[in-house]
Image: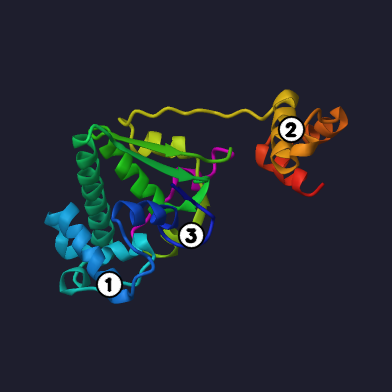
Amino acid sequence: ATAGDGVRAAYRPWRGVWTALLEFDATASPRAQARAVESALARLAPEHAEAWPLLGAVLGLSLPDNAFTQALAPKDRKALLEALLVQALRSVATEAALDGGGVLLVLEDLHVTDALSMDLLSAVVRAADTLPLLVWVSQRPVETGGADMAGETGDTGDTDRATKMFDVAQFLSSAAPTAPLRRIVLEGLDATQVDQMVRAKLAAQFPERAGRVPALLVEHLVERAEGNPFYVEELLNHL
């Protein structure tokens, strides 16, 4: 599971996903990391084995180009990276299916991310239709209609690396129109739910004080947090 944090870095929301799927050790030495990446790609996507240096982009590594990747144009690098990642994911999902399982990918807070990450998401979602694969994405509500909402993607340059506001469902409906999508809208917590959340948190921190929560406190939290559980918790932390 990976969260997008709004930092200007291409593929940042995907780093944790691919680190796990490629069984990559981020604490290893640079040489060991390079060998591990090359080995992982040769196992999961052997037809793209020469392109292993491209994986540096999604792992947050500076892997030196080889003769093959050095000759690639920026547009071709992007297309090949997406293709080899989808193939690697296909291999992982196929292996999981042999054991009677599947793969769950979780990407959180994608309301602000980079265009390259969204392009990769659309490629993965298109492939998911034929794989034992579920992609779960979360985002905060965003206003629709802006130019960035369409995910203006390019092949190179800062446009791809800059973070933007995205409506993920809208983007995928356009980029992957045949993919089975389901949108679940979470409403804000009501007073009863806030009361339950507060009691649970206080009981965990102060077991000796577990019990009824003052109605004025619940009313204050509902008004200030507007039903957002994160804000409820943060307000509690500052009381």
Instruction: Measure the C-alpha gap from mark 2 to mark 1.
Output: 49 Å
**Magenta-drawn segment:** 142-155
- The residue at which mark 1 appears reads as 32
In the rendered image, the vertical position of residue 81 relative to residue 137, given as above or below: below
SS for callout 1: helix
Q: Amino acid at mark 3?
A: Ala
- Mark earlier in primary sequence (2, 1): 1
- Mark earlier in primary sequence (3, 1): 1
For residue 70, what is the image quadrant? bottom left
| Majority SS type along the magenta span | loop
Q: Position of residue 109 (x, y in %)?
A: 52, 46
Q: Residue furthest left?
A: 47
- The residue at which mark 2 appears reads as 199
The residue sitting at 33% across, 32% down in the picture is: 177
Q: How many marks?
A: 3
Local packing at callout 1 (Cα closer than 10 Å; few below 14, some 14-19, many 20+) is: few
Q: Amino acid at mark 2?
A: Arg
The residue sitting at 34% across, 63% down in the picture is: 25
Q: Nearer the viewer, residue 93 or 75?
A: 93
The residue sitting at 69% across, 34% down in the picture is: 200
Local packing at callout 3 (Cα closer than 10 Å; few below 14, some 14-19, many 20+) is: some
- The residue at which mark 3 appears reads as 162
In the rendered image, the vertical position of residue 222 relative to residue 79, given as above or below: above
Which one is closest to the eye, mark 2 or mark 1? 2
